[in-house]
Amino acid sequence: MSTTTPEPAGALSSSSSASPASGYVMTEGASGSLSAPLGLLRFSTAGSVDDGKSTLIGRLLYDSKSVFEDQLASVQKSKINRAAGPIDFSLLTDGLRAEREQGITIDVAYRYFSTPKRKFIIADTPGHEQYTRNMATGASTAEAAVVLMDATKGVLRQSRRHAFIANLLGVRHIVAAVNKMDLVGFSQEVFDRIAADFQQFASQIGIQSVYAVPVSALEGDNVVRHSKRMPWFEGPPLLEYLESIPASVGPASGPLRLPVQYVIRPDASFRGFAGQVVSGSLKPGDTVVAMPSGVKAKVQSIVAFEDEPQSGEPGDSVTITLEDEIDLSRGDMLVGESNPPASGTEFQATLVWMHSEPLDPHKIYVLKHTTRTVRARISQIRYRVDINTLEHQKAAKLDLNEIAAVDVKTTLPLFFDSYGVNRTTGSFIVIDPLTNATVAAGIIEKAIQQSHADRATHRHHSTREERILRFGHPAGAVWLRGRPHVAELLERRLFDEGWQVQLAGSNDFLSHELVTVAKAFRLSGYITVFCPLDDGTDQKGVVRAIFGPDAFFSVRIVDDTDEEAVDRIMKVLRKWRDNYSLDSEKGKS
């Protein structure tokens, strides 16, 4: 991310040697004034479980007089109160019944408040590891993140993970809030040690702006007002620092990006393209380029809900009409003539895995990018990041909450920028096509440039290698004579797991058609489950010769039940798929 915007008063540079107790150093270009009107600031909370995130936000709302009387009365009457005082401030944000019963945050809670100097949107995110995906959701639109750390515990693994994800998602300003200072006697030594540990970690991952502040969310020290019990801390309290963070430069200065969400055609006289302007701006008369066709057209008009605005700015949901009739549909993109996005089917990305079922590099997933939905495969895990040591480790799969650098290959081209340039066109989510669960979120680093030979290949028919990349496995045959029920169960299991599979039963083809059927399915890249009748010929030998001995599996079932037989066959097929190398397929068609 670019760091050309001057740091605010209170910013602690990662290269600064100032004592954490001073809280901040004035950086070059900072005005030092907190009175200038600033724009809306979105910030999120982060940190490990029970570090006091919800209590801090509740205290911030309460002390800044941003809580309605009826809401405060409801919290005061609540039978659940885990605080020592009359008010449990965490209840101001933890609204779900399960959250209040367990005393934890589960979902992201958004709160809006303002001071005379600024407006804020807070995303209170959970600290439990199993809800890391919710934390990533809250941080994805934030400009600052408050990472809380328990003064009695220090910097924990989850604190590091959340700081890493926040930085990964382009959050430029990190506040290291050392909470529960009342439990350590408001010790400067404890604060300095924790702040130094976090600063060291932040420097390693490239965070440019870190501000460390000691607070007691429960008692209000250094949240809105200076703490008299920590006179050794010279920096501004939390709210004062948040008020000083400069408004980020929005996407308006970037090139035009307008993903088409819907084509509106109520009658033959009107054809409009609806979508939200991601970056840049457009007005009637501007020339736009349609992606992926590359066709140019001029904007005829911009239509909104009740009027026809003269321009479309970032965040505006508009419908535009064009002077020329061109082919556009959902998932396409309108861009400016200059600085077009990258377009391709392969790119490098950083992936945060968010599901209990591990990433399967052979599985075909659904990838959603802006308004475009395509099939995709994680073709390579380049390395996995160890959150504690930041080492790059080799990995064959990703488990829940793990972060890795990966290569992604899609079936259709995407139109994207790097995440550092554009958060919207540089991000995507990964969806399991069977369960429809969102299993990962990713940010795009750069396109993978294809070689001249690869580009030449794409101009001709699809290759065996391309089919293996798309399906996640090569063609294969399973021979199951005399056990039709096992064949049906196996085909169902393979299909449910995302394999490209077809059952070729005894009633699906005539005996003399066996060669044609086998060749067709092999060329198509399918796993074919054969269960024919015995006609006295060497049918098995014919199919084995067509698929090859390495991709032919003749199954003999003796004492196994049908389910046990299917389990055994699946185990063999998975091992065969996992050990298969694409190198042997290169050059074959």
Image (cartoon, helix red, strand yellow):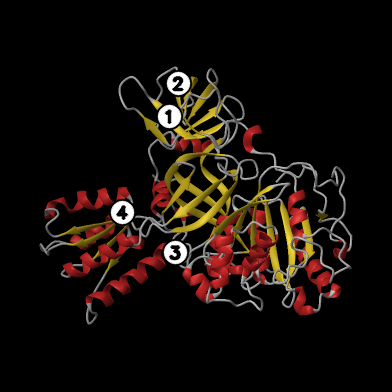
From the image, tell me which residue sits under label 2. Answer: 322
Tell me which numbered mark, 2 or 3, is placed earlier along the sequence: 2
Mark 3 → mark 4, Cα distance in angstroms: 16 Å
Residue at numbered disc 3? 578
Q: Quadrant of residue 124?
A: bottom right
Please say if the residues under marks 2 and 3 sit with CB atoms less than 8 Å apart. no
Of residues 90 and 115, the one nearer the viewer is: 115
Where is residue 155? Give x, y as percent: 72, 71
Q: In the displayed structure, does residue 171 sit left or right of residue 472?
A: right
Residue situated in front as seen by the camera: 548 or 371: 371
**C-beta proximity under 8 Å, tags 3 and 1:** no
User: In the visual, does 69 lie left or right of 208?
Assistant: left
User: Reading the chain from its start, which is encountered first: label 4 or label 1?
Assistant: 1
Of badges 2 and 4, the one in the foreground is: 2
Question: What's under tag 1, amino acid-wise?
Answer: Phe
Q: Is residue 474 above or below residue 489?
A: above
How far across and how far down the image is residue 448, in percent? 57, 43
Answer yes or no: is residue 554 visible. yes
